[in-house]
Amino acid sequence: MFRFLTAGESHGKGLTVIVEGVPAGLALSEAYIERDLARRQKGYGRGGRMQIEKDHAEVLSGVRHGYTLGSPIALGIENKDFANWTEAMAVDPVPEGAKTRRVTRLRPGHADFPGVLKYSHHDVRDVLERASARETAARVAAGAVSRRLLEEFGLRVRSHVLSIGTVNAQVPETINWDQVEESPVRCADPEAARRMMEHIDAAREAGDSAGGIFEVIAFGVPVGLGSHVQWDRKLSGLLAQAMMSINAVKGVEIGSGFANARLAGSQVHDIIEPWGGDARPFHHVTNRAGGIEGGMSNGEPIVARMALKPISTLGKPLPSVDLVTGERVQAHYERSDVCQVPPACVVGEAMMALVLAQCFLEKFGGDHLEETRRNYLGYLDGLRQFLPEAAAIPSAERPPDDAV
Protein backbone atom coordinates (compact mmCIF):
# COMPACT_ATOMS: atom_id res chain seq x y z
CA MET A 1 0.00 0.00 0.00
CA PHE A 2 1.29 3.43 -0.99
CA ARG A 3 0.82 6.22 1.55
CA PHE A 4 2.58 9.21 3.09
CA LEU A 5 2.54 11.18 6.34
CA THR A 6 3.98 14.57 7.25
CA ALA A 7 4.86 16.11 10.60
CA GLY A 8 6.25 19.43 11.78
CA GLU A 9 5.34 23.01 12.62
CA SER A 10 5.98 26.18 10.66
CA HIS A 11 8.65 27.53 13.03
CA GLY A 12 9.67 24.26 14.67
CA LYS A 13 12.96 22.48 14.07
CA GLY A 14 11.80 21.12 10.73
CA LEU A 15 9.40 18.99 8.73
CA THR A 16 9.40 15.21 8.46
CA VAL A 17 7.94 13.06 5.69
CA ILE A 18 7.50 9.30 5.52
CA VAL A 19 6.61 7.77 2.14
CA GLU A 20 5.71 4.08 2.26
CA GLY A 21 5.05 1.63 -0.56
CA VAL A 22 7.60 2.80 -3.15
CA PRO A 23 9.03 -0.26 -4.96
CA ALA A 24 12.69 -1.13 -4.61
CA GLY A 25 15.07 -0.27 -7.44
CA LEU A 26 13.83 3.26 -8.21
CA ALA A 27 16.65 5.76 -8.83
CA LEU A 28 16.18 8.66 -6.39
CA SER A 29 18.42 11.47 -5.17
CA GLU A 30 18.21 14.45 -2.83
CA ALA A 31 19.05 16.72 -5.78
CA TYR A 32 15.98 15.48 -7.67
CA ILE A 33 13.67 16.24 -4.74
CA GLU A 34 15.28 19.65 -4.22
CA ARG A 35 14.25 20.78 -7.71
CA ASP A 36 10.56 20.70 -6.78
CA LEU A 37 11.21 22.24 -3.37
CA ALA A 38 12.94 25.15 -5.12
CA ARG A 39 10.01 25.55 -7.52
CA ARG A 40 7.61 25.75 -4.57
CA GLN A 41 9.59 28.62 -3.05
CA LYS A 42 9.25 30.77 -6.18
CA GLY A 43 6.32 32.93 -7.20
CA TYR A 44 5.41 36.59 -7.31
CA GLY A 45 3.69 37.64 -4.10
CA ARG A 46 5.79 35.51 -1.74
CA GLY A 47 6.75 36.91 1.67
CA GLY A 48 10.00 37.29 3.59
CA ARG A 49 10.10 33.69 4.84
CA MET A 50 11.31 32.53 1.44
CA GLN A 51 14.37 34.76 1.85
CA ILE A 52 15.31 32.77 4.95
CA GLU A 53 14.65 29.20 3.88
CA LYS A 54 16.45 27.22 1.21
CA ASP A 55 14.54 23.99 1.39
CA HIS A 56 16.49 20.77 1.14
CA ALA A 57 15.08 17.31 1.89
CA GLU A 58 17.63 15.05 3.54
CA VAL A 59 16.97 11.38 2.85
CA LEU A 60 17.10 9.68 6.25
CA SER A 61 16.09 6.17 5.23
CA GLY A 62 14.80 4.00 2.41
CA VAL A 63 17.49 4.81 -0.19
CA ARG A 64 20.93 3.23 -0.55
CA HIS A 65 23.55 3.96 -3.21
CA GLY A 66 21.02 5.95 -5.23
CA TYR A 67 18.17 3.42 -5.31
CA THR A 68 15.10 2.83 -3.17
CA LEU A 69 15.12 -0.24 -0.95
CA GLY A 70 11.38 -0.91 -0.80
CA SER A 71 11.34 0.15 2.86
CA PRO A 72 9.75 3.42 4.09
CA ILE A 73 11.48 6.54 2.79
CA ALA A 74 11.99 9.17 5.50
CA LEU A 75 12.81 12.76 4.58
CA GLY A 76 13.77 15.67 6.82
CA ILE A 77 13.50 19.36 5.90
CA GLU A 78 15.19 21.84 8.22
CA ASN A 79 13.44 25.07 9.18
CA LYS A 80 16.29 27.57 9.18
CA ASP A 81 14.00 30.17 10.76
CA PHE A 82 13.85 27.99 13.90
CA ALA A 83 17.02 29.76 15.05
CA ASN A 84 14.81 32.82 15.68
CA TRP A 85 12.11 30.79 17.47
CA THR A 86 14.03 28.59 19.92
CA GLU A 87 12.07 29.80 22.97
CA ALA A 88 8.71 30.16 21.26
CA MET A 89 8.88 26.63 19.81
CA ALA A 90 10.90 24.89 22.53
CA VAL A 91 9.95 21.28 23.28
CA ASP A 92 10.56 21.60 27.04
CA PRO A 93 8.82 24.09 29.34
CA VAL A 94 10.33 27.59 29.25
CA PRO A 95 10.86 29.94 32.22
CA GLU A 96 8.39 32.68 33.02
CA GLY A 97 9.08 35.74 30.90
CA ALA A 98 10.44 33.73 27.96
CA LYS A 99 9.60 34.95 24.46
CA THR A 100 6.72 32.53 23.71
CA ARG A 101 5.09 34.69 21.00
CA ARG A 102 1.65 33.78 22.29
CA VAL A 103 -1.25 34.67 20.00
CA THR A 104 -4.77 35.33 21.27
CA ARG A 105 -6.27 37.48 18.50
CA LEU A 106 -8.18 35.26 16.08
CA ARG A 107 -7.74 35.67 12.31
CA PRO A 108 -10.95 35.43 10.26
CA GLY A 109 -10.72 32.72 7.60
CA HIS A 110 -7.84 30.83 9.25
CA ALA A 111 -7.86 27.63 11.32
CA ASP A 112 -7.51 29.76 14.47
CA PHE A 113 -11.14 29.87 15.61
CA PRO A 114 -12.23 26.24 15.14
CA GLY A 115 -8.78 24.93 16.07
CA VAL A 116 -8.54 26.49 19.54
CA LEU A 117 -12.07 25.39 20.41
CA LYS A 118 -11.65 21.85 19.09
CA TYR A 119 -8.34 21.21 20.89
CA SER A 120 -9.00 23.42 23.96
CA HIS A 121 -5.92 25.56 23.33
CA HIS A 122 -5.42 28.95 24.99
CA ASP A 123 -2.70 30.03 22.56
CA VAL A 124 -3.59 30.28 18.87
CA ARG A 125 0.02 29.46 18.03
CA ASP A 126 -0.71 25.86 19.01
CA VAL A 127 -3.00 25.77 15.95
CA LEU A 128 -1.48 28.14 13.42
CA GLU A 129 1.97 26.51 13.49
CA ARG A 130 0.64 23.26 12.04
CA ALA A 131 -2.12 24.85 9.95
CA SER A 132 0.49 26.99 8.17
CA ALA A 133 1.17 26.42 4.47
CA ARG A 134 4.77 25.71 5.49
CA GLU A 135 3.59 22.09 5.78
CA THR A 136 3.21 21.93 2.02
CA ALA A 137 7.00 21.76 1.65
CA ALA A 138 6.75 18.26 3.09
CA ARG A 139 4.02 17.35 0.60
CA VAL A 140 6.12 18.62 -2.29
CA ALA A 141 9.02 16.42 -1.16
CA ALA A 142 6.72 13.39 -1.01
CA GLY A 143 5.26 14.38 -4.38
CA ALA A 144 8.74 14.46 -5.91
CA VAL A 145 9.25 10.83 -4.88
CA SER A 146 5.94 9.99 -6.58
CA ARG A 147 6.88 12.00 -9.67
CA ARG A 148 10.15 10.05 -9.96
CA LEU A 149 8.17 6.78 -9.96
CA LEU A 150 5.62 7.98 -12.51
CA GLU A 151 8.36 9.20 -14.86
CA GLU A 152 9.51 5.59 -15.24
CA PHE A 153 6.23 4.90 -17.02
CA GLY A 154 5.97 8.04 -19.13
CA LEU A 155 3.62 10.05 -16.90
CA ARG A 156 4.23 13.81 -16.59
CA VAL A 157 2.51 16.32 -14.30
CA ARG A 158 2.37 20.06 -15.15
CA SER A 159 0.64 23.15 -13.75
CA HIS A 160 -0.12 26.77 -14.57
CA VAL A 161 -2.13 29.73 -13.29
CA LEU A 162 -5.42 30.55 -14.98
CA SER A 163 -6.33 33.66 -13.00
CA ILE A 164 -5.30 35.87 -10.11
CA GLY A 165 -8.04 38.09 -8.75
CA THR A 166 -9.95 39.52 -11.69
CA VAL A 167 -7.15 38.92 -14.21
CA ASN A 168 -7.77 35.92 -16.48
CA ALA A 169 -5.23 34.29 -18.76
CA GLN A 170 -5.88 33.48 -22.40
CA VAL A 171 -4.45 29.95 -22.48
CA PRO A 172 -2.87 29.02 -25.83
CA GLU A 173 -3.87 25.78 -27.53
CA THR A 174 -0.38 24.40 -26.90
CA ILE A 175 1.25 25.54 -23.68
CA ASN A 176 4.96 26.34 -23.62
CA TRP A 177 5.84 24.74 -20.30
CA ASP A 178 9.35 26.19 -20.26
CA GLN A 179 7.77 29.64 -20.49
CA VAL A 180 5.43 28.79 -17.62
CA GLU A 181 8.39 27.78 -15.45
CA GLU A 182 10.09 31.10 -16.18
CA SER A 183 6.98 33.18 -15.46
CA PRO A 184 6.92 34.78 -11.96
CA VAL A 185 3.23 33.85 -11.73
CA ARG A 186 3.42 30.54 -13.68
CA CYS A 187 1.16 31.92 -16.42
CA ALA A 188 1.22 30.86 -20.08
CA ASP A 189 -0.11 34.26 -21.19
CA PRO A 190 2.68 36.91 -20.86
CA GLU A 191 0.33 39.90 -21.03
CA ALA A 192 -1.98 38.41 -18.38
CA ALA A 193 1.09 37.62 -16.26
CA ARG A 194 2.05 41.29 -16.27
CA ARG A 195 -1.43 42.32 -15.14
CA MET A 196 -1.47 39.58 -12.50
CA MET A 197 1.69 41.00 -10.96
CA GLU A 198 0.13 44.45 -10.98
CA HIS A 199 -2.90 43.00 -9.18
CA ILE A 200 -0.64 41.43 -6.53
CA ASP A 201 1.22 44.73 -6.11
CA ALA A 202 -2.07 46.54 -5.58
CA ALA A 203 -3.15 43.99 -2.97
CA ARG A 204 0.16 44.38 -1.13
CA GLU A 205 -0.13 48.18 -1.21
CA ALA A 206 -3.65 47.94 0.24
CA GLY A 207 -2.59 45.54 3.00
CA ASP A 208 -4.76 42.88 1.38
CA SER A 209 -4.24 39.47 -0.27
CA ALA A 210 -5.11 37.88 -3.62
CA GLY A 211 -6.45 34.48 -4.66
CA GLY A 212 -6.99 32.82 -8.02
CA ILE A 213 -7.46 29.65 -10.02
CA PHE A 214 -4.77 27.20 -11.11
CA GLU A 215 -4.76 24.07 -13.23
CA VAL A 216 -2.84 20.80 -12.86
CA ILE A 217 -2.58 18.39 -15.81
CA ALA A 218 -1.24 14.84 -15.91
CA PHE A 219 -0.14 13.47 -19.29
CA GLY A 220 0.49 9.88 -20.31
CA VAL A 221 -1.86 8.35 -17.73
CA PRO A 222 -2.95 4.85 -18.81
CA VAL A 223 -6.58 3.79 -18.98
CA GLY A 224 -7.90 2.19 -15.82
CA LEU A 225 -6.46 3.93 -12.76
CA GLY A 226 -9.05 4.18 -10.01
CA SER A 227 -12.23 2.13 -9.98
CA HIS A 228 -15.98 2.45 -10.28
CA VAL A 229 -16.74 -0.34 -7.79
CA GLN A 230 -16.48 1.61 -4.51
CA TRP A 231 -16.90 5.27 -3.65
CA ASP A 232 -13.49 5.56 -2.00
CA ARG A 233 -11.62 4.07 -4.97
CA LYS A 234 -12.84 6.58 -7.55
CA LEU A 235 -9.91 8.53 -9.00
CA SER A 236 -11.99 11.70 -9.23
CA GLY A 237 -12.89 11.46 -5.54
CA LEU A 238 -9.30 10.81 -4.49
CA LEU A 239 -8.08 13.77 -6.52
CA ALA A 240 -10.79 16.08 -5.20
CA GLN A 241 -9.94 15.19 -1.60
CA ALA A 242 -6.22 15.63 -2.22
CA MET A 243 -6.65 19.02 -3.88
CA MET A 244 -9.16 20.28 -1.31
CA SER A 245 -6.63 19.45 1.42
CA ILE A 246 -4.25 22.12 0.07
CA ASN A 247 -4.28 25.24 2.26
CA ALA A 248 -6.83 27.84 1.08
CA VAL A 249 -8.29 25.69 -1.75
CA LYS A 250 -12.07 26.10 -1.64
CA GLY A 251 -13.14 24.60 -4.94
CA VAL A 252 -12.11 21.79 -7.32
CA GLU A 253 -13.36 20.77 -10.74
CA ILE A 254 -12.29 17.89 -12.96
CA GLY A 255 -12.23 18.82 -16.63
CA SER A 256 -14.90 21.37 -17.56
CA GLY A 257 -16.96 20.42 -14.50
CA PHE A 258 -18.79 23.65 -13.72
CA ALA A 259 -19.17 24.76 -17.34
CA ASN A 260 -20.57 21.33 -18.25
CA ALA A 261 -23.38 21.78 -15.72
CA ARG A 262 -24.83 24.59 -17.87
CA LEU A 263 -24.84 22.63 -21.14
CA ALA A 264 -26.93 19.90 -22.72
CA GLY A 265 -25.54 16.37 -22.55
CA SER A 266 -24.93 16.34 -26.30
CA GLN A 267 -22.56 19.28 -25.80
CA VAL A 268 -20.72 17.76 -22.86
CA HIS A 269 -19.86 14.11 -23.39
CA ASP A 270 -16.65 13.34 -25.25
CA ILE A 271 -17.20 11.41 -28.49
CA ILE A 272 -15.20 8.17 -28.74
CA GLU A 273 -13.39 7.16 -31.93
CA PRO A 274 -11.27 4.17 -32.98
CA TRP A 275 -7.62 4.85 -32.24
CA GLY A 276 -4.29 3.16 -32.80
CA GLY A 277 -1.93 6.00 -31.96
CA ASP A 278 -0.95 4.76 -28.51
CA ALA A 279 -1.87 2.12 -25.94
CA ARG A 280 -5.59 2.90 -26.18
CA PRO A 281 -7.83 1.09 -28.65
CA PHE A 282 -10.08 4.17 -28.72
CA HIS A 283 -9.74 7.84 -27.89
CA HIS A 284 -11.92 10.87 -27.25
CA VAL A 285 -12.30 13.72 -29.72
CA THR A 286 -12.50 16.23 -26.83
CA ASN A 287 -11.59 16.09 -23.15
CA ARG A 288 -14.36 17.87 -21.28
CA ALA A 289 -14.38 15.01 -18.76
CA GLY A 290 -10.82 15.88 -17.77
CA GLY A 291 -9.46 12.39 -18.37
CA ILE A 292 -11.74 10.63 -15.87
CA GLU A 293 -14.99 8.75 -16.54
CA GLY A 294 -16.82 6.66 -13.94
CA GLY A 295 -14.05 7.29 -11.43
CA MET A 296 -11.39 5.82 -13.75
CA SER A 297 -8.74 7.35 -15.99
CA ASN A 298 -9.70 7.08 -19.67
CA GLY A 299 -6.29 7.71 -21.25
CA GLU A 300 -6.77 11.41 -21.93
CA PRO A 301 -4.84 14.05 -19.94
CA ILE A 302 -6.20 14.36 -16.42
CA VAL A 303 -7.17 17.98 -15.79
CA ALA A 304 -8.00 19.43 -12.38
CA ARG A 305 -8.68 23.10 -11.61
CA MET A 306 -8.56 24.58 -8.14
CA ALA A 307 -9.94 27.82 -6.70
CA LEU A 308 -7.59 29.26 -4.08
CA LYS A 309 -9.09 31.89 -1.79
CA PRO A 310 -7.02 34.94 -0.77
CA ILE A 311 -4.90 33.95 2.24
CA SER A 312 -6.25 34.81 5.68
CA THR A 313 -3.38 36.89 7.10
CA LEU A 314 -3.75 40.49 5.96
CA GLY A 315 -1.36 43.43 6.22
CA LYS A 316 -4.35 45.47 7.36
CA PRO A 317 -6.08 43.00 9.69
CA LEU A 318 -9.84 42.57 9.85
CA PRO A 319 -11.89 43.11 13.02
CA SER A 320 -11.94 40.06 15.28
CA VAL A 321 -12.09 38.89 18.90
CA ASP A 322 -9.42 38.24 21.53
CA LEU A 323 -9.52 34.60 22.64
CA VAL A 324 -8.75 35.43 26.30
CA THR A 325 -10.55 38.71 26.98
CA GLY A 326 -13.44 38.33 24.54
CA GLU A 327 -12.92 41.94 23.47
CA ARG A 328 -13.18 43.25 19.95
CA VAL A 329 -9.70 43.67 18.46
CA GLN A 330 -7.87 43.75 15.16
CA ALA A 331 -6.89 40.25 14.01
CA HIS A 332 -3.34 39.00 14.57
CA TYR A 333 -0.78 39.65 11.84
CA GLU A 334 1.87 37.03 11.14
CA ARG A 335 4.51 37.51 8.42
CA SER A 336 2.99 35.98 5.31
CA ASP A 337 2.66 36.01 1.54
CA VAL A 338 0.33 38.28 -0.40
CA CYS A 339 -0.53 35.67 -3.05
CA GLN A 340 0.05 31.92 -2.92
CA VAL A 341 -1.44 30.92 -6.27
CA PRO A 342 1.87 30.32 -8.15
CA PRO A 343 3.43 28.11 -5.42
CA ALA A 344 0.08 26.34 -4.95
CA CYS A 345 0.54 25.06 -8.51
CA VAL A 346 3.61 23.09 -7.40
CA VAL A 347 1.77 21.76 -4.35
CA GLY A 348 -1.08 20.73 -6.68
CA GLU A 349 1.39 18.86 -8.88
CA ALA A 350 2.63 17.02 -5.79
CA MET A 351 -0.88 16.00 -4.73
CA MET A 352 -1.71 14.87 -8.27
CA ALA A 353 1.48 12.80 -8.40
CA LEU A 354 0.81 11.26 -4.98
CA VAL A 355 -2.73 10.19 -5.93
CA LEU A 356 -1.62 8.82 -9.31
CA ALA A 357 1.24 6.90 -7.71
CA GLN A 358 -1.19 5.41 -5.20
CA CYS A 359 -3.61 4.31 -7.94
CA PHE A 360 -0.80 3.17 -10.25
CA LEU A 361 0.69 0.87 -7.60
CA GLU A 362 -2.76 -0.37 -6.63
CA LYS A 363 -3.29 -1.38 -10.26
CA PHE A 364 0.17 -2.76 -11.11
CA GLY A 365 1.79 -3.56 -7.75
CA GLY A 366 5.31 -4.91 -7.52
CA ASP A 367 7.90 -4.99 -4.74
CA HIS A 368 10.65 -4.09 -7.22
CA LEU A 369 10.42 -1.53 -10.03
CA GLU A 370 11.07 -4.17 -12.67
CA GLU A 371 8.18 -6.26 -11.37
CA THR A 372 5.94 -3.19 -11.60
CA ARG A 373 7.19 -2.62 -15.13
CA ARG A 374 6.47 -6.21 -16.17
CA ASN A 375 2.96 -5.93 -14.78
CA TYR A 376 2.41 -2.64 -16.56
CA LEU A 377 3.69 -3.88 -19.92
CA GLY A 378 1.63 -7.04 -19.50
CA TYR A 379 -1.46 -4.89 -19.03
CA LEU A 380 -0.64 -2.94 -22.19
CA ASP A 381 -0.15 -6.21 -24.06
CA GLY A 382 -3.61 -7.27 -22.91
CA LEU A 383 -5.10 -4.23 -24.63
CA ARG A 384 -3.97 -5.60 -27.99
CA GLN A 385 -7.16 -7.62 -28.24
CA PHE A 386 -9.08 -4.36 -28.66
CA LEU A 387 -6.66 -2.75 -31.14
CA PRO A 388 -6.87 -2.84 -34.94
CA GLU A 389 -4.40 -5.38 -36.30
CA ALA A 390 -2.13 -2.69 -37.74
CA ALA A 391 -1.85 -0.76 -34.48
CA ALA A 392 1.10 -1.25 -32.17
CA ILE A 393 1.48 -0.70 -28.44
CA PRO A 394 4.39 1.69 -27.78
CA SER A 395 7.07 1.29 -25.14
CA ALA A 396 6.13 2.40 -21.63
CA GLU A 397 9.04 4.83 -21.80
CA ARG A 398 7.55 6.80 -24.69
CA PRO A 399 7.27 10.45 -23.56
CA PRO A 400 3.67 11.70 -23.62
CA ASP A 401 2.38 14.57 -25.69
CA ASP A 402 2.22 17.59 -23.36
CA ALA A 403 -0.09 19.57 -25.61
CA VAL A 404 -3.56 20.38 -24.38
Image (cartoon, rainbow, N blue to C red):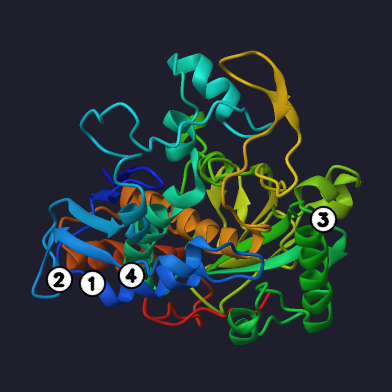
Mark 3: give few (<14), some (14-19) or many (20+) Cα within 10 Å.
few
- Disc 4 or 1, which lies upstream in sequence? 1
Per the model, the C-alpha gap separating discs 3 and 2 is 50 Å
Q: Are the residues tagged 3 and 2 within 8 Å (C-beta)?
A: no
Identify residue type, mark 1: Leu
Secondary structure of the residue carrying tag 3 is loop
Q: Residue 60 location, x and y as percent?
A: 15, 58
Identify residue type, mark 3: Ala
Per the model, the C-alpha gap separating discs 2 and 4 is 14 Å
Left-right relation of 53 to 107:
left
- Disc 2 or 1, which lies upstream in sequence? 1
- Disc 2 or 4, which lies upstream in sequence? 4
Secondary structure of the residue carrying tag 4 is helix
- Total labels drawn: 4
Q: Residue 335 location, x and y as percent?
A: 57, 52
Query: What residue would you read off at disc 4?
Result: 33
In front: label 2 or label 4: 4
Residue 251 seen by the camera: yes
In front: label 4 or label 1: 4
Identify residue type, mark 4: Ile
Q: Residue 362 location, x and y as percent?
A: 33, 47
- Disc 4 or 3, which lies upstream in sequence? 4
Query: What residue would you read off at disc 2?
Result: 67
Q: Are the residues tagged 2 and 1 within 8 Å (C-beta)?
A: yes
Q: Residue 165 location, x and y as percent?
A: 82, 57
Q: Residue at x 67, y 57 (%)?
A: 290
Q: Are the residues tagged 4 and 1 within 8 Å (C-beta)?
A: yes
> Dividing the picture into quarters, in which one does residue 27 lie?
bottom left
